[in-house]
Amino acid sequence: MPEPAITVAMSVFNGARFLPEAIESVLGQDFGGFEFLIVDDGSTDSSPDIMQDYASKDARIRAIVRENRGLVASLNEMIDLPSAPHSPHGR
């Protein structure tokens, strides 16, 4: 896969009810040159399974499943994960 132009990042915690719709919304964009990072923050529902199912079907998706650390930790983790080039003016 070529280097993505942008990174779309999403944090999930027990969001299985709306997760497929959210993922489909991102994947349905006209612009396709992106990577899609999804961090599961220790969900106890089927969110990790949903994420991993989508990731197995679309190479743009990187699903990260880990223990619960909270939204701020998830967002901070996603700052270091993108493959897309960083802005010369910072992240």
Image (cartoon, helix red, strand yellow):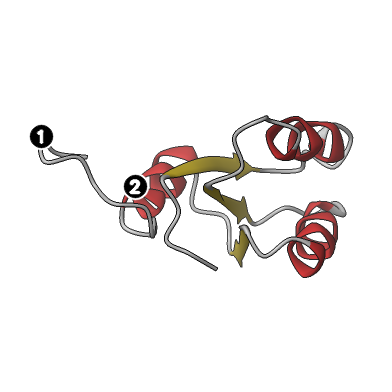
Residue 51 percent across, percent down from the top left: 76, 56
Q: Nearer the viewer, mark 2 or mark 1?
A: 1
**Which sits in the foreground, 83 or 30?**
30
Q: Quadrant of residue 27?
A: top right
- Taking the spot 80% from the left edge, 51% from the top edge, the residue there is 47
Residue 30 percent across, percent down from the top left: 67, 30
Are dots 2 and 1 in contact, CB under 8 Å?
A: no
Answer above or below: position of 35 versus 17: below
Please name the amino acid that badge 1 sits on.
Answer: His
**Which sits in the foreground, 21 or 26?**
26
Which mark identifies residue 89? 1
Which mark identifies residue 36? none
Answer above or below: position of 31 versus 34: above
Which mark identifies residue 76? 2
- Secondary element at image label 1: loop
**In the displayed structure image, the side of residue 49 where residue 38 appears, left or right:** left
Residue 45 percent across, percent down from the top left: 85, 51
- Taking the spot 68% from the left edge, 43% from the top edge, the residue there is 13
Please name the amino acid that badge 2 sits on.
Answer: Asn
Q: Of the residues under marks 2 and 1, which one precedes in the sequence? A: 2
Crowd rating for badge 2 (residues with CA inside 10 Å; few <14, some 14–19, many 20+) = few
**Which sits in the foreground, 5 or 74?**
5
**In the displayed structure image, the side of residue 82 where residue 12 appears, left or right:** right
**Which sits in the foreground, 12 or 7?**
7
Quadrant in the picture for the C terminus: top left
- Secondary element at image label 2: helix
Marks 2 and 1, Cα distance to the nearest angstrom? 18 Å
Residue 3 percent across, percent down from the top left: 42, 61
Crowd rating for badge 1 (residues with CA inside 10 Å; few <14, some 14–19, many 20+) = few
- Taking the spot 65% from the left edge, 43% from the top edge, the residue there is 12
- Taking the spot 14% from the left edge, 39% from the top edge, the residue there is 90
Quadrant in the picture for the N terminus: bottom right
